[in-house]
Amino acid sequence: MKDPMFFNKIAAAMLVSLLLFFGLPQLATALRGGHHGGGHEAEGGNPFPQYPVAYTSESAAGAEAAAPVDFATLLAAADPKAGERRAALCKSCHTFDKGGANGTGPNLWGVVGRTVAGHAGFNYTGALKAAGGEWTFDRLSAFLENSQSYIPGTAMVQRFPKAEQRAEIIAYMNTMSDSPLPLPTPAAAPVAEEPAPAAAEGEAAIPAPADGASATTTGETAVPADGAAEAPAEDHSGH
Ligand code: HEC
């Protein structure tokens, strides 16, 4: 190929087709005067049935999971061992063992259920001290999801957008304690025969495959959607 613009042209062609692919159905819907909801039933006229369908399933899932991803369900299924591996990156600042030293961050032995900013000998920020109360499973999850937005001004900077990963870490932290708290009961409880609390070690036998699956899908559709849109562009500019 002599043409130095060859790959640029291909990239441009792909962008245009992407635009057409995603833009046309929207245009069609707009011309018919319908919103997304209006178009579904009259799918016959739509050249790209996948498009509105994707919207339908997304909003349906959103409605189902109106109570945002049941964290208790994730916790019940979470493997503390996996959490321990993930917690490796906390260890540059924290110890988890009993009587462990404070580092950049406080020792975290027994932190689940512990008073927020309550570890003796650590110089907490005013922001964390002002938060008050105790570290519940949910509050730890919120803190790990985005520490800075949950407690603005805290000295800890961590983000774990994936609820499954937070559940693993928190399940692990709960084992690092003199008195691990009983895991919360999953909201939708299709596992009536199996009392999850029996799992003192957190080794609950993977209940609720349905919930787990839907939670996973919700989490994953949100993230890769962005990635997928960006990936092709990056790929081609790179070559
Ligand atoms: C770069 C250092 C650093 C890393 C990495 C880090 N933290 Fe922290 N963490 C801190 C600091 C500093 C504080 C105290 C924050 C304050 O006073 O505002 C803290 C506070 C906390 C607290 C509150 C403790 C209490 O006594 O109230 C928890 C829980 C916590 N961290 C968990 C974690 C977990 C879990 C990880 C790994 C996923 C992690 N941290 C990674 C620095 C870190």
Image: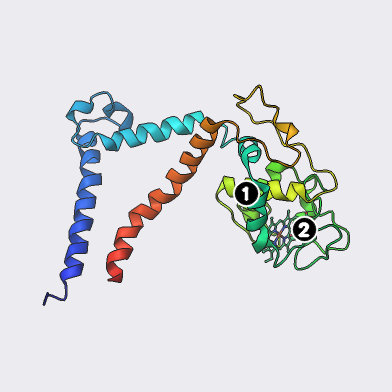
Give the vertical position of 127 relative to 68 (above or below).
below
Image coordinates of residue 46 in percent, x first then y, are 20, 32
Secondary structure beneath dot 2 equals: loop
- Nearest the camera: 157 or 231? 231
Give the vertical position of 104 relative to 49 (above or below).
below
Graded by Cα atoms within 10 Å as few (under 14), some (14 to 19) or many (20 or more), the crowding at tag 2 reads: many
Give the number of the disc on residue 166: 1
State if disc 2 and disc 1 touch (CB < 8 Å): no
Give the vertical position of 203 relative to 39 (above or below).
below
Q: Which of marks 1 and 2 is nearer the N terminus?
A: 2
Amino acid on which disc 2 is placed: Phe
Q: Quadrant of ligand 1?
A: bottom right
Give the number of the disc on residue 225: none
Q: So how many labels did they put on this image? A: 2
By what rule are the colours in the image chosen? rainbow
Give the number of the disc on residue 96: 2
Q: Which residue is drawn at 53% across and 32% down?
A: 209
Amino acid on which disc 1 is placed: Arg
Q: Residue at x 70, y 49 (%)?
A: 172
State yes or no: Cβ of the residue under disc 1 lies below 8 Å from any atom of ligand 1.
no
219 vs 234, left or right, is: right
Q: Can residue 86 be seen by looking at this rendering?
A: yes
Q: Which residue is drawn at 63% across and 59% down?
A: 158
- Nearest the camera: 221 or 133? 221
- Nearest the camera: 73 or 13? 73
Secondary structure beneath dot 1 equals: helix
Image coordinates of residue 1 in percent, x first then y, are 12, 74
Image coordinates of residue 63 in percent, x first then y, are 48, 29
Give the vertical position of 237 relative to 139 (above or below).
below
Q: Residue at x 22, y 46 (%)?
A: 21
Image coordinates of residue 230 in percent, x first then y, are 35, 58
Graded by Cα atoms within 10 Å as few (under 14), some (14 to 19) or many (20 or more), the crowding at tag 1 reads: many
